[in-house]
Amino acid sequence: SSSCMRALAGKYVPEAGSSSVQSCSAGTFSADEAYECTSCPEGKYSAEVSSSYCSSCGLGEFSVSGSSSCTTCDAGKYASAAESSSCSVCEAGNFSPAGASECSICEGGKFSAQGSASCTTCLKGKYSSTTSET
């Protein structure tokens, strides 16, 4: 060959004198002329091999560094921003379904513990108000 070819984005050449190019694995990416792939940062992912970029996780989901997909927040948790690295737990008196971007307040006559997927109805002789009693 009369010249050396550059590795295109999503591929890499780890050693000098190489006669072939390698593909970045899912969860990583590279720019042109890379000698290694970089792990996608927290809150982002790359699902395909040979990625030149990482995509952002949406509301209600998260990812750790080097992810090939985003993980949906469990019921009782939420992720209120895109590119989250973890889900937050709903406070007592609130609830959320899986994949939530926020927690909802339990209506009057119902209650919940921290991290609840739903609210529970108060038994006879007991009550719960959505406003604090003074």
Image: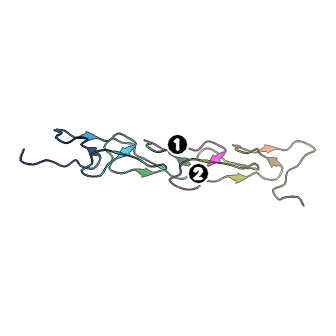
Q: Where is residue 2 shown, x and y percent of the image?
A: 6, 47
Outermost left residue? 2
**Amino acid at dot 1:** Thr
Q: Residues within 10 Å of mark 2 (few under 14, many from 20)?
A: many
Which disc number belongs to residue 94?
Answer: none
- Image quadrant occupied by the C terminus: bottom right
**Residue 124 picture location, percent across and down:** 91, 42
Marked residue nearer the N-terminal end (2 or 1): 1
The magenta stretch is 68-85
**Residue in the image at 81% along x and 48% along y:** 110
Q: Quadrant of residue 123?
A: top right
* Image point (32%, 42%), residue name: 24
* Residue in view at x 53 percent, y 51 percent: 84
Q: Would you say residue 76 sits in the magenta stretch?
A: yes
**Where is mark 1, residue-wise?**
71
Numbered mark located on residue 79 in the image: 2
Marks 2/1: CA–CA distance = 11 Å
Look at the image and tell me in which quarter the N terminus lies. Answer: top left
Q: Is residue 69 left or right of residue 99?
A: left
Q: Is residue 126 magenta?
A: no
* Secondary structure of the residue carrying numbered label 2: loop
Q: Residue furthest bottom?
A: 134
Kindly identify the residue that appears in the image at 55 percent across and 56 percent down.
Answer: 81
